[in-house]
Image: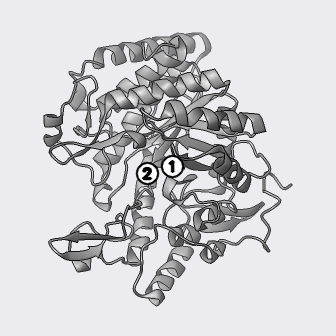
Amino acid sequence: MNAGLPDAVTPESWAPDSWQDRVALQQPRYDDAAELAEACAHLAQLPPLVTSWEVLALKQSLAEAQEGHRFLLQGGDCAESFADCTSPLISNRLKVLLQMSLVLVHGLKKPVLRVGRFAGQYAKPRSADTETRDGVTLPSFRGDVVNSPAFTAEARRPDPQRLIQAHAHSALTMNFVRALIDGGFADLHHPEYWDLAWVEHSPLAAEYRQMVAGIGDSLRFMETLAGPIAGFSRVDFFTSHEALLLHYEQSLTRQVPRHPGWFNLSTHFPWIGMRTASLDGAHVEYFRGIRNPVAVKVGPSVTPEQLLPLIDALNPHDEPGRLTLIHRMGNAKIGTALPPLLQAVKREGRRVLWVADPMHGNTESTSNGYKTRRFDNIRGELDQAFDLHAAAGTRLGGVHLELTGEDVTECMGGARDLSETDLDRAYKSMVDPRLNYEQSLELAMLIVRKSVGGGAGA
């Protein structure tokens, strides 16, 4: 086997476009095949967004997380928009992930692997292909990479040129994030760079600042004894998105010098959502051939008989760091749905990284029409996840969260006990409700208390 390249994937059995021979769910219906082909050809000539050596470095780090030597923090927007490609929004998103990772590193006493849900999270699955208002039926809004949210025929037309725009906005986002990190934005000597002004009076602020002060004192003490310590001025940071739109992903799938096989160079860490994880579907066919580490969302209806063949298809040679399973069961269902999966995977001796997504199974609608999530249910699912893994003799190696650094009111509860009436104040999400900064930081603190103390967030 060549440097982790799955033997089963050969030029005869797989190609970047072999998914087109399978049923491809959740794809837009373009009305001009020639226009789509032209856009894809253009995209295929553009520079990649990430590099193969970054992809392989992430895979190695995920392998270490599988062994319990790292913890994965994967988070970001539910759906990016082109309009949100601005320096304040990007830097605030980075700030909250850095602050959460600092809490986790301090509490868990192990390195944290930071993966952002951004620089490509422009497509979203929909429950129906069309939407009807006042007797008018139009294509559903599928994210900025496909069409526009305005309810007009022109806006809702799937436009292949948006593939090129998505690449451009992803590149701008990646460029800014890389510049911030390389310029010392993540320097542990200056955590004040990460402050978000609107939470100055947060109930969590004092606890967080006390933690930062303690880390700063420890760092200065070590450097007094040993001199400047390399590695504290920057961090590794990776990107991820749901690889939903297969024409886009195929166009950015490349071969590179000195490494066999094919890499998806639109992102470091693509994942398959629940709606497109069919064993004989186009998404699994595409994913099985790329060398990136990959993930699959696993919902409460999945059985061991469905999951084990999926693992075999995506990681037939049990490659370390290759496959992450992100369970998203819901607070009410995780207790019965997750244990059989943990037991089956453990029994078969398959090497996977288990990650909890406590967001997507806990979505509900309020009486005033908002889609929301209750912080108590998010916390409850996460608490149960830790307990269920402990009981099964498996390891929960990370979390996958939808969050933002903005002062939004989209999820109820948390430190300020946001209520249904508070949602009106700053509900900004186009698709799913996100944790705000304060709720995200609180959840990081709860993860530490649960992991270290073993109690239900106590």
Crowding at dot 2, Cα within 10 Å, few <14 / some 14-19 / many 20+, comes out as many
Residue farthest to the right, as pictured: 1
| Residue name at image x 73 percent, y 70 percent | 14
Q: Residue 156 versus residue 166: which sits nearer the camera? A: 156
Q: Residue 200 versus residue 19: which sits nearer the camera? A: 19
Q: Earlier in the sequence, mark 2 or mark 1?
A: 2
- Asked whether, in this view, residue 77 is left or right of residue 251, the answer is left
Q: Residue 165 versus residue 435: which sits nearer the camera? A: 435
- Asked whether, in this view, residue 241 is left or right of residue 51, the answer is left
Does the image show residue 388?
A: yes
Crowding at dot 1, Cα within 10 Å, few <14 / some 14-19 / many 20+, comes out as many
Residue 371 drawn at (x, y percent)? 26, 46
Q: Is residue 355 above or below residue 316?
A: above
- Asked whether, in this view, residue 414 is left or right of residue 325, the answer is left
Q: Quadrant of residue 75?
A: top left
Residue 233 drawn at (x, y percent)? 51, 31
User: Residue 239, labelled with which disc?
Assistant: 1
Circles 2 and 1: CB distance less than 8 Å? yes
Element marked by disc 2 = loop
Residue 132 drawn at (x, y percent)? 23, 71
User: Residue 118, labelled with which disc?
Assistant: 2
- Asked whether, in this view, residue 147 is left or right of residue 177, the answer is left
Does the image show residue 191?
A: no
| Residue name at image x 52 percent, y 46 percent | 301
Three-letter code for the amino acid on which mark 1 is drawn: Thr
Query: Which quarter of the rendering shows the N terminus?
Result: bottom right
Task: Compute the Cα span from label 2 to label 1.
Answer: 6 Å
Element marked by disc 1 = strand
Q: Residue 272 versus residue 2: which sits nearer the camera? A: 272
User: How many numbered tags mark residues here?
Assistant: 2
Q: Is residue 82 above or below residue 116?
A: below
